[in-house]
């Protein structure tokens, strides 16, 4: 496979017809496991034994995820959830939280192609070739995103465990709707549970951040 | 008695203040009181760890990734009662990626008779290379049960013929979240019942005989689970065969340390517990717990660090809940509204544990000469209760304040006026005045249920109460470095209330510095002892020690500055980053300049939490009496709530909550308001949404998740107005009291009363779900069912 082919393959979600056929040549289909993963080089299965990377198997294999503007190569099993890959030892992006285990609380919210998704209900493999944004990508160095700054200012957090998911939902809201009503904010955060009771201050923080970003957007438009 | 000095302090609330002399330890500075003007303390300070939390940089226990770390998982009983006949872990052990399996007989709570007594009880555990393999391994463990009869309803459990949950005397668990003097006993059972614990005041029969009206009613409350967003769990790493480091999601770092140290018989200083950040606890996270000891065992067996975090289902089943209650009340009053007698016969279930008492509000809020309360715990085959934000109080408040509205109705009195008649605490009366004004009490339906239309509005109120349980021990280290920067160290944890920030505020205030001059080292038992975050005590237990330590550091800095300023140390003051002569403020040096002149590289001092100033053993009985005569030594508080009831759907919308509370001297107005919001919101959910549902036929919880166990969401939010009445308690040098718990006590009762005001029917059972509202509105249909 030349470099160009490799690139194409990654953009297309990691599995090309060519490599799929290659994998079938390895005879693994006989195990009855759907061919999901292939890779170059040697890999380690859960047993610790090395496996021939060119075969298709349920073991972990490297994939590339585009996280906060950077391509990150990381090991993932076919069943690996995006939340676990983000939080795992390789990426260590633990700002994204695992809370309810099953898509009920929004604690694991990240943006995939600008849309809030529950990373505990998303396979890591399905996130390949897409733009993933996590809480760690919001600030530029010490410069907080306006939503982050207003969360601190209005104390829109207590224990802080829902905060990452809450902020990501609010960012998606303001990206799509720079001037939301209170109803819009309640709607946008309705999938994010908080146990400490920060909602009233979340509403205030988002309204204040909206004023800033709305103002900034208006200015940019004027300049244009 | 320690060395003391006499100081003059001002107690009480503005307009009702009183100045007096009291004795305090010589090591304490002049206490902050009603007349104190502070610059940083009492203002709105964003939390100093806010940036870490909004950027995702804050590392919680669940976030720990250590090299070579394994993942632990517990296998739990799937039957509510039975004997484990056979347990086969061989398939799990053979699964690639599984490192160690902890067998039933090696579990820390292994019952010799192999009996399990609730669905969710720990029976085995594994550690594997990742979460998925650990979960797979658990599923491969084969367990064969001999099922036994069980009971999950309180009424059935009280039947003498019911299956026994415990067949031997029970040792009650006790945590720092429990009300003092409750729990921790070996209790004898009569069948499944413990108690009643009886309390009497006056002569209740005489009181009822004197009454012009008597009301009797029965109230029921549900089981509520804590549902902190970060589940319980630890990461354990053995640094040596007798040396353990544990990262724990806990509200009591030292209680985790003690439990691990005792279980593994380790040298005292060889267990270190770290809780830099933690994702909520609400009373359920004291001690290492069974899962914590399992985690440490797995780490020991595998010789690797192990992370063991519970999943959401386990969280609901096994690590705590607020017990249910069934409360029979009888209340007597005279025509003029004076209470003559109150009686409460209550029982409830905390599953296999106790803790179902709920008489606190009746015993403490309203004046009543004749009182009789009986509280019993009923054991059932369900997960153990744990302290939960104001143990017993939301239950007791719901029944008491609902019943008082019925008495007021019988008397033809305004419910607020009726309550005023039975209160003499000036703080509470002031709170009633403010609350009534802010909600516009006069807007309520003069006669309950007089509202018309599909959507009907009503207004109700209820009273809070909490006692001041905080005291020693807490010790704080303050170090001033020769660049002027200050480190403050204590081993306790920030449960999410903002204690870390309050520590920095108190130190900065005392030293006359800015917040960014102070670095707080917290949540690590390598630092001196601090309180568990229970009983609304953290600020009040620890804050005074911070101030005492900072005060000692300041005096040392004065010693350095005095010769340079050609003044005596006791003529100096520190403020705005300067040390100056009090009588001549222009004779000054910057703090940093003085720091440069110290001998050595730092000044290091410790401060201990002094006994409460009302403590007669420390300060003499005269002083104890002086404080006892004050009525302000408990939190009062009241909430006024407006609701809208949809009479077609039965849905209740809470529109507005005015929450008026007192907590002594406020440390941080911003985070205090957040805590009040939080208490109210949990109260709203307790009133309307949350309910742990056990299937009576199988003994299994049917909603162990966050989609069917309903904690509140953004659309359930009322408008909340948090109002703080400054009350100078002067029980310690910062004059603080707690707020976490009192803020959640009266919410359910006030909502219930507001619903009554809207629709004219009382609903005596929580949660007040639409089906109950519709049944209350259409009693004929209910009978037809």
Image (spheres, rainbow, N blue to C red):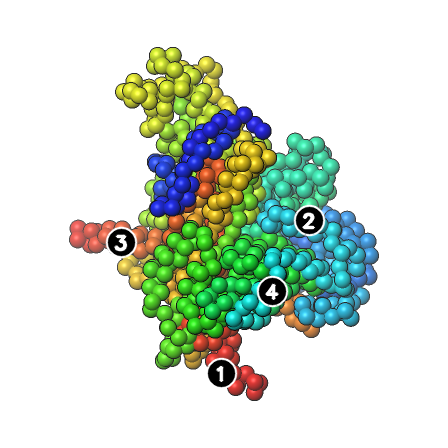
Q: Nearer the viewer, residue B95 or B749?
A: B749
Label 1 resides on the chain identified as B
Residue mark closest to the camera, 4 vs 1: 4
The local secondary structure at tag 1 comes to loop
Dot 3 corresponds to which residue?
A211
Disc 3, disc 1: CB below 8 Å?
no
Mark nearer the N terminus (4 vs 2): 2
The lab-note entry on whether marks 4 and 2 share a chain reads: yes
Label 2 environment density (alpha carbons within 10 Å; few <14, some 14–19, many ≥20): some
Q: CA separation, marks 4 and 2?
A: 35 Å
Label 3 environment density (alpha carbons within 10 Å; few <14, some 14–19, many ≥20): some
Q: Is residue B46 left or right of residue B289?
A: left
Vertical order, B328 against A204 (above or below): below
Residue B112: x and y in percent read 82, 53
Label 4 environment density (alpha carbons within 10 Å; few <14, some 14–19, many ≥20): few
Label 2 resides on the chain identified as B
Residue drawn at 56 percent across, 87 percent down:
B784
Q: Is residue B378 left or right of residue B783?
A: right
Q: CA separation, marks 4 and 1?
A: 39 Å
Vertical order, B247 against A5 (above or below): above
Dot 4 corresponds to which residue?
B206
Rendering quarter of residue B471 = top right
Residue mark closest to the camera, 3 vs 1: 1
Dot 2 corresponds to which residue?
B184
* Total tally of numbered discs in the picture: 4
Residue B22: x and y in percent read 47, 33
The local secondary structure at tag 3 comes to helix
């Amino acid at each position: 496979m030349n470099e160009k082919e490799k690139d194409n393959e990654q953009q297309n979600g990691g599995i090309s017809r060519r490599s799929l056929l290659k994998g079938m040549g390895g005879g693994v289909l006989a195990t009855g496991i759907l061919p999901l993963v292939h890779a170059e080089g040697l890999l380690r299965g859960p047993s610790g034994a090395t496996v021939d990377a060119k075969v298709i198997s349920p073991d972990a294999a490297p994939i590339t995820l585009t996280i906060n503007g950077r391509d990150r190569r990381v090991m993932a099993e076919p069943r690996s959830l995006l939340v676990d890959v983000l939080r795992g030892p390789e990426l260590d992006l633990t700002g994204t939280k695992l809370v309810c285990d099953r898509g009920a609380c929004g604690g694991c919210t990240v943006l995939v192609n600008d849309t809030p998704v529950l990373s505990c209900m998303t396979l890591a493999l399905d996130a390949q070739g897409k733009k993933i944004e996590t809480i760690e990508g919001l600030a530029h160095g010490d410069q907080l995103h306006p939503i982050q700054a207003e969360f601190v200012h209005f104390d829109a957090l207590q224990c802080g465990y829902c905060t990452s998911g809450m902020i990501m939902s609010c960012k998606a809201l303001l990206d799509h709707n720079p001037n939301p009503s209170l109803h819009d904010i309640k709607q946008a955060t309705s999938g994010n549970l908080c146990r400490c009771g920060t909602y009233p201050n979340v509403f205030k923080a988002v309204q204040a951040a909206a004023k800033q970003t709305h103002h900034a957007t208006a200015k940019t438009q004027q300049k244009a | 008695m320690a060395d003391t000095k006499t100081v003059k302090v001002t107690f009480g609330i503005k307009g009702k203040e009183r100045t007096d002399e009291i004795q305090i330890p010589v090591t304490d500075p002049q206490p902050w009181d009603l007349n104190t003007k502070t610059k940083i303390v009492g203002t709105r300070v964003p939390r100093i760890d806010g940036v870490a939390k909004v950027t995702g940089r804050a590392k919680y226990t669940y976030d720990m990734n250590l090299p070579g770390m394994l993942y632990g998982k517990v296998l739990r009983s799937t039957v509510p009662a039975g004997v484990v006949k056979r347990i086969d872990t061989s398939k799990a052990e053979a699964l690639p990626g599984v490192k160690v399996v902890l067998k039933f007989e090696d579990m820390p709570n292994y019952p010799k008779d192999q009996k399990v007594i609730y669905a969710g009880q720990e029976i085995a555990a594994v550690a594997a290379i990742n979460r998925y393999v650990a979960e797979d391994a658990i599923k491969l463990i084969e367990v064969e049960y001999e099922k036994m009869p069980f009971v999950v309803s309180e009424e059935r459990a009280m039947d003498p013929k019911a299956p026994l949950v415990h067949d031997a005397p029970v040792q009650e668990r006790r945590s720092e979240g429990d009300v003092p003097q409750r729990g921790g006993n070996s209790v004898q059972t009569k069948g499944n019942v413990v108690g009643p614990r009886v309390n009497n005041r006056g002569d209740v029969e005489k009181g009822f005989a004197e009454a012009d009206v008597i009301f009797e009613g029965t109230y029921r409350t549900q089981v509520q689970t804590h549902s902190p967003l970060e589940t319980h769990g630890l990461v354990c790493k053995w640094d040596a065969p007798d040396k353990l480091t544990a990262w724990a999601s806990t509200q009591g770092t030292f209680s985790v340390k003690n439990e691990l140290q005792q279980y593994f018989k380790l040298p005292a200083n060889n267990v270190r517990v770290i809780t830099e950040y933690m994702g909520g606890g609400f009373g359920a996270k004291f001690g290492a717990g069974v899962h914590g000891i399992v985690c440490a065992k797995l780490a020991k067996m595998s010789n690797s660090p192990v992370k063991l975090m519970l999943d959401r289902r386990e969280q609901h089943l096994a690590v705590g809940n607020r017990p249910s209650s069934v409360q029979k009340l009888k209340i007597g009053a005279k025509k003029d509204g004076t209470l003559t007698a109150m009686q409460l016969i209550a029982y409830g279930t905390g599953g296999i544990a106790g803790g179902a008492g709920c008489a606190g509000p009746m015993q403490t809020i309203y004046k009543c000469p004749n009182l009789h309360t009986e509280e019993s715990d009923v054991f059932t085959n369900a997960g153990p209760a744990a302290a939960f934000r104001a143990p017993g109080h939301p239950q007791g408040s719901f029944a008491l304040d609902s019943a008082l509205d019925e008495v007021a109705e019988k008397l033809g009195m305004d419910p607020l006026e009726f309550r005023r008649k039975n209160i003499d605490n000036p703080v509470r009366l002031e709170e009633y005045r403010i609350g009534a004004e802010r909600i516009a009490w006069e807007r309520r339906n003069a006669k309950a249920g007089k509202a018309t239309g599909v959507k009907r509005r009503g207004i109700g109120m209820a009273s809070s109460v909490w006692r001041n349980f905080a005291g020693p021990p807490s010790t704080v280290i303050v170090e001033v470095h020769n660049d002027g920067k200050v480190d403050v160290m204590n081993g306790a944890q920030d449960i999410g209330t903002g204690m870390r920030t309050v520590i920095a505020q108190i130190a900065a205030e005392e030293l006359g510095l800015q917040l960014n001059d102070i670095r707080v080292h917290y949540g690590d038992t390598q630092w001196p002892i601090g309180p568990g975050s229970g009983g609304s005590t953290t600020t009040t237990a620890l804050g005074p020690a911070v101030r005492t330590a900072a005060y000692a550091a300041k005096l040392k800095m004065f010693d350095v500055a005095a010769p340079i300023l050609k003044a005596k140390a006791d003529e100096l003051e520190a403020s705005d980053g300067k040390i100056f002569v009090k009588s001549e403020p222009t004779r000054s040096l910057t703090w940093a300049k003085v720091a440069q002149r110290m001998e050595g590289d730092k000044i290091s001092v410790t401060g201990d939490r002094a006994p409460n100033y009302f403590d007669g053993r420390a300060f003499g009985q005269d002083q104890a009496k002086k404080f006892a005569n004050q009525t302000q030594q408990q939190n009062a508080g009241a909430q006024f709530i407006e609701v809208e009831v949809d009479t077609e759907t039965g849905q209740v919308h809470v529109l507005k909550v005015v929450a008026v509370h007192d907590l002594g001297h406020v440390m941080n107005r911003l985070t205090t308001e957040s805590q009040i919001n939080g208490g109210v919101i949990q109260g709203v959910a307790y009133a309307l949404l949350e309910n742990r549902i056990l299937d009576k036929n199988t003994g299994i919880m049917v909603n162990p998740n966050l989609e069917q166990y309903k904690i509140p969401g953004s659309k359930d939010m009322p408008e909340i107005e948090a109002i703080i009445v400054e009350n100078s308690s002067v029980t310690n040098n910062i004059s603080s009291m707690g707020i976490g718990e009192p803020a959640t006590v009266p919410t359910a009762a006030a909502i219930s009363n507001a619903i009554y005001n809207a629709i004219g029917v009382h609903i005596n059972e929580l949660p007040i779900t639409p089906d109950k509202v519709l049944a209350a509105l259409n009693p004929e249909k209910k009978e037809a069912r």
